[in-house]
Image: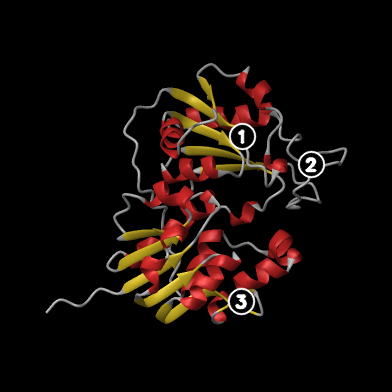
Amino acid sequence: MMEKKKQVCIIKLDGLGDVLRTTAILRCFRNDEVTWITEEAAFFLLAGSPFVKKITTLSGILAAQGVEFDELYNFDEDIRACKLAHNLKAKKKKGFGIKNGRHFPFDADSEYAYALSKNDELKFRLNKKTYQQIIFEMAGCRWEGQDYVLGYQPKGAVKYEVGINYLVGKKFPNKAWPRWKELSGMLDSVCLQNQFKTLKEYIDWVNSCRILVTGDSLGMHIALALKKKVIILMGSTSWHEIETYGRGIILKAGLSCSPCYKKNKCSRASFCMDLITPEMVCSEIKNICQSGY
């Protein structure tokens, strides 16, 4: 008699890059039936995944409210996600729930992740764990370097030696590298990021590049998921949380104020991203090419 599959619910709503890197946890549930609750914008990142049976968006959440899951995992601090985790029926709940109107850990496995959200010194300076390692601990799973699971698999050939993924979201403008034009003028086979209309177009473009130069962005996560070589330029956000799987090279200026997670434009005389020079990036590109990648 076949063992009945567990009904597992995973909640990770938005932050497209965060949704994509959370997919590593799916490898712990490959023999279960997984329902993933997310925002509509992230649907395409999960669609086609062999480890997700059903994708439910917030607008269609009523379909999940009548189900009792065996296990529920909420990796999102968003209050909407925490309320969902509190209200949905499940025999076991891990990650974040809600208490006094704020996110709160369901159990001891999520206390470290909770502390990171409350303690800047821990998050900015002391933490050495990657995001993936942190969510595996939240789930009570063993972290063994499990990789991304990207549902859509582009099939186009590589067209460019280097892609420059220079655009960033409005939330953290300090992630932007101001010297990408200088770099593009130093390279032969190079393609610049565009304002793509769809995620499919964006993923196809990343796939067309052999090497991606990028900040801490969705493009970085797409490139890592596609097993590209990635040169990651970082300053305002924590490089320790980035799991590169041995495919990424992180360049940073190393200023004492970095990372800062400031959402306003930097007003300091020395801006951390500006101190990463095109020559530094070119040197890493040359090293990758010489390695025969």
User: Amino acid under label 2?
Assistant: Lys
User: Amino acid under label 3?
Assistant: Phe
Mark sitting on residue 94:
none
Do the residues bearing badges 1 and 2 touch, measured as CB atoms within 8 Å?
Answer: no
Name the element at disc 1. loop
In percent of width and height, residue 224 lies at 47, 44
Q: Residue at x 33, y 60 (%)?
A: 54
Do the residues bearing badges 2 and 3 touch, measured as CB atoms within 8 Å?
Answer: no
In percent of width and height, residue 16 lies at 52, 49
**Cα–Cα gap, marks 2 and 3:** 31 Å
| Residue assigned mark 1 | 167
Task: Examine the rendered structure and indicate whether residue 90 appears above or below residue 269.
Answer: below
Q: Residues within 10 Å of mark 2 (few under 14, many from 20)?
A: few
Q: Residue at x 41, y 54 (%)?
A: 147
Q: Residue at x 47, y 52 (%)?
A: 20
Q: Identify the image quadrant of residue 126.
A: bottom right
Nearer the N terminus, badge 3 or badge 1?
Answer: 3
Residue 243 visible somewhere in the drawing: no
Task: State the residue in front, 216 or 231.
Answer: 216
User: Amino acid under label 1?
Assistant: Leu
**Cα–Cα gap, marks 3 and 1:** 34 Å
Residue 30 visible somewhere in the drawing: yes
Do the residues bearing badges 3 and 1 touch, measured as CB atoms within 8 Å?
Answer: no
Nearer the N terminus, badge 2 or badge 3?
Answer: 3
Mark sitting on residue 104:
3
Q: Residue at x 40, y 79 (%)?
A: 90
Residue furthest out toward the right: 269
Residue furthest out toward the left: 1
Quadrant for the C terminus, please. Answer: top left
Task: State the residue in front, 184 or 2.
Answer: 2
| Residue assigned mark 2 | 265
